[in-house]
Image: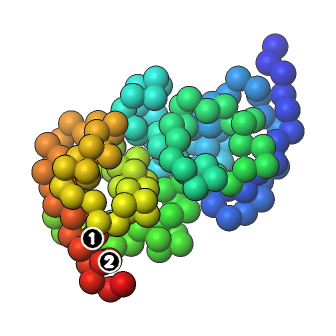
Amino acid sequence: MDTIIETTFMLNGESVTRRIPVRQNLVDFLREEMGLTGTHIGCEHGVCGACTVRVDGKIVRGCLMLAVQAEGRSVETIEGLSDSGEIADLQGAFHKRNALQCGFCTPGMLLTVQDLALRNPQATREQIREHISGNYCRCTGYQAIVDAVETVLSARQARS
């Protein structure tokens, strides 16, 4: 029988307290317990990037983090970033540039490219490719994704 621990953390800006089995990973908790299904489960080995979330401002693989490890931390999902408007320009560019097809990788990809935009707002095409290299996309061939990110980075630079 799994040990259960009461855990409190911030989830998309709101405090959450739940009794969580110690072996439950974060992505399963988010999907099953919180109904936040934008974070996807892919390889379950931290390789594909489908489960990417932001914890304390850094992107992590939700399949490799236990939910109880979120204690006292801030967790943000694609729903949180989308609802806040933080990635609205990226979402628009992905749509306009056809940088999404089946959409399975898109939430993790959006969190990853937003991470790049915050850390390196003048990233080159090669740096964009390098930064998204841990996120698998089987539909687009990445060209449209890189185009969309480059467009947003240029637009953000022009506004600043």
Residue in front for this viewpoint, 135 or 106: 135
Mark number for residue 3? none
Instruction: Tell me: 129 left or right of 108.
Output: left
Q: Looking at the picture, which amino acid does disc 1 mark?
A: Val
Local SS, label 1: helix
For the N terminus, the quadrant is top right
**Residue 140 place in picture, x, y as percent:** 16, 46
For the C terminus, the quadrant is bottom left
Q: Kindly identify the residue that appears in the image at 14 percent across and 43 percent down.
A: 141
Q: Looking at the picture, which amino acid does disc 2 mark?
A: Arg
Extreme top residue here? 1
Extreme bottom residue here? 159
* 1, above or below 56, in the image: above
- The reply to whether residue 114 is in sight is no
**Residue 148 place in picture, x, y as percent:** 21, 63
Q: Kindly identify the residue that appears in the image at 47 percent across and 74 percent down.
A: 85
Residue in front for this viewpoint, 79 or 114: 114
**Residue 57 place in picture, x, y as percent:** 58, 55
- The reply to whether residue 141 is in sight is yes
Q: Do the residues labelled 1 and 2 touch (CB within 8 Å)?
A: yes
The residue wearing badge 2 is: 156
The residue wearing badge 1 is: 152
